[in-house]
Amino acid sequence: MTPALWPPTAQEIVFLLLSVVAVGSALLVVTTRQLVHAALWLVACFGALAGCYLVLTAEFVAWVQVLIYVGAVVVLMLFGIMLTRAPIGRTADLDSGNRVVAALVALATAAVLVTVVIDGFRSAYTPLDPGTGSAKSLGGSIFRTWVLPFEALSILLLAALIGAIVISRTDIKGRE
Amino acid sequence: MNTITAPAIEYLQLAPLLIVFGAGILGVLVEAFAPRYLRRAMHIPLTLLSLAGAFALVIVQTIKGVPTKPSAMGAVAVDGPTLFIWGTILVLAFISLLLLNDEDHFVPAASAVPGSAEEERALIEGNVHTEVYPLALFAIGGMLLFPASNDLLIMFVALEVMSLPLYLLCGLARRRRLLSQESAMKYFLLGAFSSAFFLYGTALLYGYAGSVDLAKISTALSANVGQDALLFTGAALLGVGLLFKIGAAPFQAWKPDVYQGAPTPVTALMASGTLVAAFGALLRVFWVAIGELDWDWSPIMWGVAILTMVVGAILAITQTDIKRMLAYSSIAHAGFLLVGVVAIGDAKQNATALAAILFYLAVYGIASIGAFAIVTMVRDAGGEAWHLSRWAGLGKRSPKLAGLFAFFLLAFAGIPLTSGFFGKYAVFQAAVAGGAVQLVVVGVVASAVAAFFYVRVIVLMFFNDPAPDGPTVVLPSWGTASVVGFAALATVVLGVFPQPVLDLAQSAAGSLFVR
């Protein structure tokens, strides 16, 4: 049974607010003229997304989002900015010459995806039961139903590590 | 109470996969602990034995009987077509690795700037990147997993496991390094792009069917009506990802650049193994998951097949680089194979078409490895003699080599008494039986156009005078010699007496894909 759309529940209001934050900060990531600010807006965007996951009862995914994206990916980016000679501060030439085309492509992609999703689901409704996204149930399905993809992913990571060593190590000696 | 029931894994059915991945991991350990001078000597037997062992296990599995339901919690389907594809990929990978064994295909120090003193020093010190062996094994393991995947999630993971090591291997050519690095970069960016398409398609189809399992998507087709936008967009995005991997037009742009830049043994592995694996996965998605939808996708597939054949055949004529020409030829062959994909119908028709595609894949893969093996042997001062004009008069200098190359080209063209003839004949026959007569007409015309540029190279080799400073033909190592010998033998034998392998393909296809 689909509950009425009006008045919205507290969950729905929180979800909407978080999504506004996520979309707004995502826009700021690509429009700000300071590289470090872009990275920090990314933190806000990922954080708001994690909040969305939390509202949808996917608690484990939310914490993983915080740990991996906010904790690791953005910190890695900041380190990247810090350790290279990337310009910090207001930069005028941060905008690419292709930005009009890029914006058009992004808008078109968004339009297609939004239309498809709205058309596909319309007023479909899934009741949110607490606990379906818990670490326990997720762990159970990863190590049971999805165990083979999970193991194959570890192979992928290993291959990526070896590859990174191959193309970046400079201290390779000759035959001993 | 807080326990998870252990998943049911059919280890014996997965054994070929596990052996290849296991050998890859052992290879990494060899890299970590073995002294540098011993590594190659340890990698070669490890790699070749693991591939041979996996092949033996595929045969054991075939004799024991083909499983009738998916293994490993529904993730992998080890059915008749999978076993045939596994056997094919393992044979192709084995001979590609014999080619890869040769000393001087790979860069001595990948991180050194091309042309720098550092690179020079590494070259003099005799450095080798022995990491290519485990990387190749990982790629081959991904190739085995890709066509066997029974749900879209493992298919995506397999796609990445297959592609990532190949992106890396492409950038490690010893000569024309800038070209090689450019090809790796291009392949990586475009490949990542196509993976994103695949993933979006998966997400939308999951939204449609509520499952990523191919069989469940198929059942959802009749159950969920009225969500067509989700289904069609998802299927289209998934199709883009898969068609990119086989290099079908209009997603073929990466193929010539990558085939040209990659070290030739890696090109051989991609031209054979990746194509076989990607076709297996494409068939599984289009025939199993959205097979009921063939009225909707087959007109599009018609268009893609025609475009691929025409683009491959016509653009090949204008090429002056031998590897680029072979790449366009590979695009044209992907088009011929797509003709078989369109020939879907009832179960019997499907089995015929599937058998034809499997046979075609096997014979094309072997012939293309043979052709690339010969490309590695014709050398200039700066490496392989890549410009076609350098091949002029080769037939007068080394008639045996030029004769073999001409023979492989004739097999590509599909001349009778070569294996390529029966491959093409089988696919076109299946397509005619499936009612795609017009498509077959286009296919035959495209074959004729393709035959023109194959014959042009043969004429160039035999009826032109050799340049005074022409390329030299290096004495092949035992590996390269046996690859060329095996490929030539297989092309002759399958061209004269194809029945055993055709029968094998038919019995493999007879059970169709499990659901």
Image (cartoon, coloured by chain):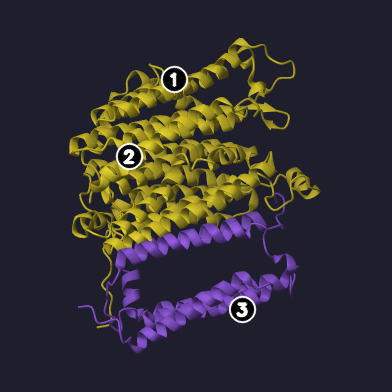
Chain colours: A purple, B yellow
Q: Are marks 3 and 1 in contact (CB under 8 Å)?
A: no
Q: CA distance from mark 2 to mark 3?
A: 48 Å
Judge whether A136 appears above or below B241 on screen.
below
Where on the picture, by quarter, is residue A16?
A: bottom left
* Chain containing mark 2: B
**Badge 1 density bin: few <14, some 14–19, many ≥20, Cα 10 Å:** some
Judge whether A110 appears above or below B441 on screen.
below
Q: Is residue B431 visible?
A: yes
**Pointer 1: what residue?**
B448
Where residue B502 appears, x then y in whole percent?
29, 28
Judge whether B39 appears above or below A96 on screen.
above
- Farthest residue toward the front? A6
The amino acid beneath tag 1 is: Ala
**Pointer 3: what residue?**
A40
Q: In the structure shown, which secondary structural element does the residue marked by tag 1 occupy?
A: helix
* Chain containing mark 3: A
Where residue A89 appears, x then y in whole percent?
74, 75
Q: CA distance from mark 3 to mark 1?
A: 59 Å
**Badge 3 density bin: few <14, some 14–19, many ≥20, Cα 10 Å:** some
Left or right: residue B154 versus residue A22 is: left
Q: In the structure shown, which secondary structural element does the residue marked by tag 2 occupy?
A: helix
Where on the picture, by quarter, is residue A9?
A: bottom left
**Pointer 2: what residue?**
B299
The amino acid beneath tag 2 is: Pro
Q: Nearer the viewer, mark 2 or mark 3?
A: 2
Q: Are marks 1 and 2 in contact (CB under 8 Å)?
A: no
Residue at screen point 60% across, 72% down: A29
Residue at screen point 50% across, 62% down: A107
The amino acid beneath tag 3 is: Leu
